[in-house]
Image (tube, rainbow, N blue to C red):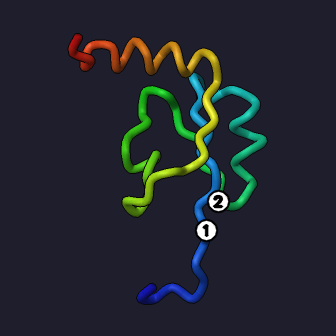
Amino acid sequence: MRGRKYKESIGPLIIVHDSNSPIVKAARNIAGVDVVNAKDVSVIHLAPGAHSGRLTIYTETSIKILDERLSKRLVS
């Protein structure tokens, strides 16, 4: 809290497939809500401050993109 007068709480995370989708414009004005592209999502977005359990909302196409991106890492 050094140098910060107010603490802003972290809200839900919305993962989209395209940065031009209408939900980006709708959510960017809400305090605490973050919108991230499916290609750019990382652990820092999912668990800010090392606290897991952040509400995450996915679009259907972003799930497909994440499946393609992470299927290479899964070991069967």
Figure disc tally:
2
Location of residue 23 (image quadrant)? top right
Res 32 label: 2
Q: Are marks 1 and 2 in contact (CB under 8 Å)?
A: yes
Above or below, comparing residue 58 to residue 12 in the picture: above
Real-space Cα distance between discs 1 and 2?
6 Å
Q: Residue at x 23, y 10 (%)?
A: 76
Q: Residue at x 69, y 48 (%)?
A: 28
Residue 40 placement (x, y as % from top left): 42, 34
Q: Residue at x 61, y 29 (%)?
A: 58
Residue 38 placement (x, y as % from top left): 49, 28
SS for callout 2: loop
Res 65 label: none
Residue nearer the viewer, 51 or 35:
51
* Residue of label 1: 9
Residue 32 placement (x, y as % from top left): 64, 59
Q: What's the amino acid at mark 2?
A: Gly
Above or below, comparing residue 55 to residue 20 in the picture: below
The quadrant of the picture occupied by the N terminus is bottom left
Point out the residue furthest to the front here.
76
